[in-house]
Image (cartoon, rainbow, N blue to C red):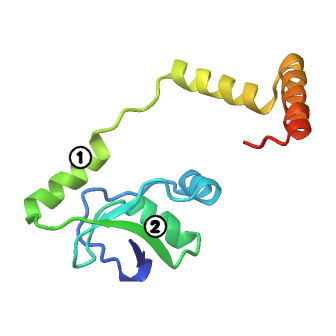
Amino acid sequence: MQIEISRIIIKNRVRKNLGDLSSLMESIRRHGLMNPVVINSRNELIAGHRRTEAARRLGWAQIEARVVDGTDAAQLVEMEIEENTQRKNLTSDEITDAYLRLDRLRNPGFFTRVWKAIVRFFQRLFGKRR
């Protein structure tokens, strides 16, 4: 569901320092919000403070949110902790492989370009579209 960012209530958070939001803002600007923020039915933020603030700084009026209810105060804090600790960064090898893959996709070799041109030619010739 979409919610007005101004309606999100940010109470006492575990994370006190949001850090530099510039790279998150650029990611959201380029790709959109990949994961919704989490709120309860009273519009109190449970998870996604950095995403909410980045969207606010980008000038967004609304943000995608998931509503979670039926939890007590302890469970809400636990969910915030889980949101920020139960994740695993990519290893340096995984990052290197990902950027090499991205480079190959953006800059295909000669034979790949020739093959794709041949495929497009026959698709146009026989009227097949993907």
Quadrant containing the C terminus is top right
User: For this rendering, which residue is in front, 124 or 71?
Assistant: 124
Residue 27, percent from left and from top:
59, 52
Residue labelled with disc 1 = 82
Mark 2, residues whose alpha carbon is within 10 Å: few (<14), some, or many (≥20)?
A: some
Q: Position of residue 70 (x, y in %)?
A: 10, 66
Q: Residue at x 36, y 59 (%)?
A: 48
On the rendered structure, is 16 left or right of 60? left
Q: Is residue 97 above or below residue 88?
A: above
Q: Amino acid at mark 2?
A: Glu
**Comparing marks 1 and 2, which lies closer to the viewer?**
1
- Residue shown at the point (11%, 63%) measured from the top left: 71
Q: Position of residue 31 (x, y in %)?
A: 60, 54
| Residue occupying the point 46% across, 29% down | 90
Q: Between disc 1 and disc 2, whose residue precedes?
A: 2
Q: In terms of secondary structure, where does tag 1 sit?
A: helix
On residue 40, the disc is none
Q: Secondary structure at mark 2?
A: helix
Picture coordinates of residue 45 (x, y %)?
A: 29, 68
- Residue 53, numbered circle: 2
Residue 42 sits above or below residue 105 on the image: below
Q: Locate residue 76: give its quadrant.
A: bottom left
